[in-house]
Image (spheres, rainbow, N blue to C red):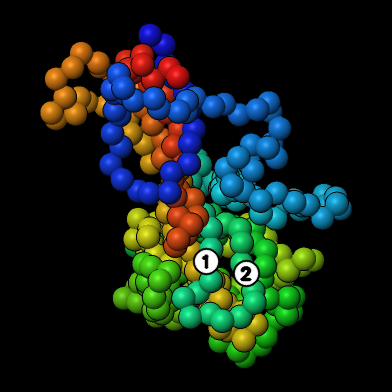
Amino acid sequence: MGFRQHEAQVFVGIMLVVAAVPATDQSPCLDCGVAGDDEVAFLQMQGVMTHGSGETHSNQIDHMDRPPKFVLALAAKEAASKKTAGGAESMAVQYVAAFAPYFNYQGDLKVQGSIAVEGTGLIETATQTLSWQLEGLDPRCNESNEGVSNACGIHIHQGTSCYEDAGGHYWNTTLIDSDPWATVTYQTRKNESAWAVGVEVVTGLTNFEVLGRAMIVHDFTGARIACGIIIPEKLAVPAFTPYFSYTGSLEVEGAMDVTGMGVTDDAGQILSWSLKGLDPNCSS
């Protein structure tokens, strides 16, 4: 029996269990593929809004609401240009898949997009390098607001939830005296959008230490307007074993990838699998 491949969206994070279909169960077909090679159709299938300005720029991508793969590719490109004396510098990449309004924000701005977070270095050289592509930002941030704390900022905060206060900026205060996030800002362009590649912030923290932390976007006044959570690029289920109470003859083999999407009430998982040894009754 060959492998069956599939990708699906799931809006609940739970243990993954492969189930056989009882003879009386008429389950719907889940083996639905992607129609053609149309990128827009594929992105929309994943719940990603796609739209462009109709203009072409040699140094900018029009579609401002791309999935995390876009900023991850930018981060990878940036990292590829970095070399140490002994060769390429290793990196760890995580990302913020989506944003929700900050828990007490009452304004009209609706930040969308994603941010890649590349980790390099250790101890006092530990650095997070941010690459972002965002829209729905404060249009006043097309110029700097000198002297206003956090104005037009993008910062990792201490908090681990977008349902409550995110606390202050997050960095290793033992190793680094001054706030490294104080100068990290975005600049809006047309359509209230902004993008950047390779914004280095020496925090004294590894990427493991910032995993699960809140990424906060500020407006022109320094107020917190949006929140996202730093998550792994992808998780994997490398193998399966029989369920503890299963006594049947089916032996499931294969692997599954789990990619995060959304935040707060829209948070979910995209599952991609290649499996064999499944129940043949699940063919329809």
Q: Provide residue 239's location: percent of width, then percent of height.
A: 29, 27
148 to the left or right of 127: right
Helix, strand or loop status at disc 1: strand
Identify the residue at the far bottom of this view. Answer: 147
Q: Could you say where residue 25 lies in the image, as x and y percent from the top left?
A: 34, 25
Q: At 67% across and 67% down in the image, what residue appears?
A: 136
Q: Is residue 46 above or below residue 277?
A: below
Image height of 149 relative to 61, above or below: below
Relative to residue 40, is residue 47 drawn left or right?
Answer: left
The mark nearer the N terminus, 2 or 1, is 1
Amino acid type, residue under disc 2 in the picture: Lys
Tell me the residue that label 2 is attached to. 110
* Vertical side of 146 occupied by 153: above or below: above
Residue in view at x 14 percent, y 20 percent = 247
Q: Which residue is mark 1?
A: 100
Nearest the viewer among 61 and 137 is 137
Label 2 to label 1: alpha-carbon separation: 8 Å
Q: Residues within 10 Å of mark 2 (few under 14, many from 20)?
A: some
Q: Residues within 10 Å of mark 1 (few under 14, many from 20)?
A: many
